[in-house]
Amino acid sequence: MKWIFLLLLPLGAFSQNYNVDELKKLSEEKQRVVIKAAINSLEPESVIGYLRTLEDNNIDLKPSCDPVIAKASNLSWPSDLYNLVNILIRQQTDKPALENMLTSAISIWDKGEWSQKFWMLIKQNNLVLPGNELYTVNNLGHKIYNVELYLAQKQKAASWEPTRCWKLIMK
């Protein structure tokens, strides 16, 4: 069943009401209208394939980035968000818009294996996200945790008493 879905996915993504050759023939204003309408009609996961197709055909996406950023809030996979952010960076999207998008989606990407990839992307593109007092991020995208502050917050919030082992570590 999964293979059938994977085989049909490109057909669904590319059977939308757009044809790149026809799109190129339109004026820039009409292109923007068609692209925005297509982005709004596509599922968030399909937007990435659509944008890549347009990008591969040298169609300027920058005027159409606002609906793309709005779609990003509906993504649930860090890989999709990462690909979308890369497309937006290549399109030279305004940094504040990217920073707001990444900040609002931090719960999606700032965990597991994707965290370092995103932090590297953020550092490489000089994006600024609000800091977290529990950790800092170095130039390699690695988090450096403030363990003492973390334990102090946990202890305060849950009336948690460190075990003997934790007391030895903290010394």
Image (cartoon, rainbow, N blue to C red):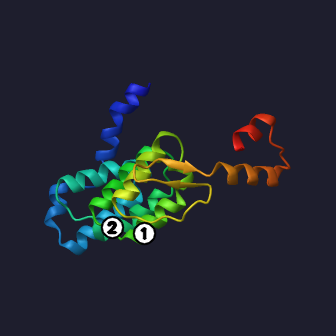
Examine the rendering and report whether any part of residue 19 can be seen.
no
Image quadrant in which the N terminus is located:
top left
Residue 171, position as x, y percentages in the image: 71, 44
* Number of marks drawn: 2
Estimate how packed mark 2 is, as few (under 14), some (14 to 19) or many (20 or more) residues with alpha carbons within 10 Å: some
Which residue lies at the image location 58% right of the left edge and 59% below the top edge?
132
Taking depth in this image into account, of 26 and 101 the one nearest to the observer is: 101
How far is mark 1 from mark 2, CA to CA? 7 Å
Which residue lies at the image location 17% right of the left edge and 59% below the top edge?
58
Up/down of 104 relative to 113, above or below: below
**Quadrant location of residue 79?**
top left
The image's mark for residue 44 is: none
User: In the rendered view, does 141 fall on the left or right side of 8?
Assistant: right
Labelled pair 1, 2 in contact (Cβ < 8 Å): yes
Examine the rendering and report whether any part of residue 68 can be seen.
yes
Up/down of 112 relative to 103, above or below: above
Residue 143, position as x, y percentages in the image: 51, 49
Label 1 residue SS: helix
Estimate how packed mark 1 is, as few (under 14), some (14 to 19) or many (20 or more) residues with alpha carbons within 10 Å: some
Furthest residue toward front: 171
Which residue lies at the image location 20% right of the left edge and 62% below the top edge?
59
Which residue lies at the image location 40% right of the left edge and 49% below the top edge?
140
Label 2 residue SS: loop
Taking depth in this image into account, of 134 and 45 the one nearest to the observer is: 134
Residue 94, position as x, y percentages in the image: 35, 71
Residue 139, position as x, y percentages in the image: 40, 53
The image's mark for residue 97 is: 1
Taking depth in this image into account, of 158 and 67 the one nearest to the observer is: 158
Q: Amino acid at mark 1?
A: Ala
Up/down of 167 relative to 154, above or below: above
Residue labelled with disc 2: 93
Q: Amino acid at mark 2?
A: Thr
